[in-house]
Amino acid sequence: MSAPHTPWPFPLWIAHRGAGKLAPENTLAAFRLGAAHGYRAFECDIKLSADGVPFLLHDATLERTTNGQGVAGDRPWAELSRLDAGGWHSRTYAGEPMATLDALAAWLHANGHALDLEIKPTPGQERVTGEAVGRAARALWAGPKSPPLMFSSFRPEALAGARDTAPEVPRALLLDTLWPGWEGVADDLAVVAVITNHQVMTQDLIDRLHDLGRRALVYTVNDADTAQRLIDMGIDGIVTDAVDRFAP
């Protein structure tokens, strides 16, 4: 079954957290490396500092990917901006700073690259994070020549917040499992796409999404056989860490 006929600005291959295995994830260095491998679409995680600055980080806490400690969302941006977000990965990237959404948007606009912006709220901050990210993105992607942008999240409350402040930005529901009621939530949020764990995606699910005019995407595929199987099934997008192995 063919994909929906509505315009879809994203290429098949999307680089996960920049090039988040070869360089420190969610930093501008990772995005630059992904682009150097030919990628033109990227995924990253966004949350809020204590003073409301949208910045890139996957975990709720700082320990894994910075030299900081504690809950990232409890810290003001002035403190977060001084952390080393690269030394954990390798000496090459020691001193690499965390990135704001403002800085990432400037880079994406300069290069014309697309972004799947995953809203990754600090627990308990789901709706306010979605609202703030929506407001920020609406301002940063305001121009008529802005590159493609899509919001995604595992948290429906975050997507609802982003919808309310930036209704024109398309939304995608992220699913690790097909939990009861997800289809109704997708309808309520008027999502243009569903992005699942690749192990969850089936031919039937792709066909059902396409019948509804939605796109079907998967994360995080790093195996060539899995990627080819999904391509043969008609998948619309593949999020990958293996930017050095899959040529977009």
Image (cartoon, helix red, strand yellow):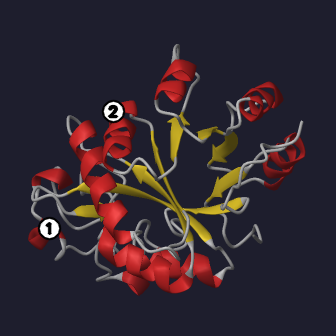
Reply above or below: 114 against 73.
below
Could you say which is closer to the camera, residue 93 or residue 210? 210
Rendered-image quadrant of the N terminus: top right
Q: Position of residue 192 (x, y in %)?
A: 59, 42
Q: Quadrant of residue 195?
A: top right
Could you say which is closer to the camera, residue 48 or residue 163? 163
Q: Which mark is residue 89?
A: none
Question: For the residue marked with disc 1, what is the amino acid?
Answer: Trp
Q: Position of residue 69 (x, y in %)?
A: 16, 57
Residue at position x 73%, y 59% from top?
12
Horizontal side, residue 140 vs residue 128: left or right: right
Q: Position of residue 246 (x, y in %)?
A: 76, 67
Reply above or below: 157 against 235.
above
Looking at this rendering, what residue extends furthest in the front direction? 144
Q: Nearer the viewer, mark 2 or mark 1?
A: 2
Is disc 1 surrounded by few (<14), some (14 to 19) or many (20+) residues within 10 Å? many
Residue at position x 26%, y 38% from top?
127
Is disc 2 surrounded by few (<14), some (14 to 19) or many (20+) residues within 10 Å? some
Q: Which residue in the protein does label 1 denote?
A: 77
Residue at position x 51%, y 49% from top?
170
Q: Which residue in the protein does label 2 denote?
A: 157
Distance between the Cα atoms at labels 2 and 1?
A: 24 Å
Rendered-image quadrant of the C terminus: bottom right
Q: Quadrant of residue 113?
A: bottom right
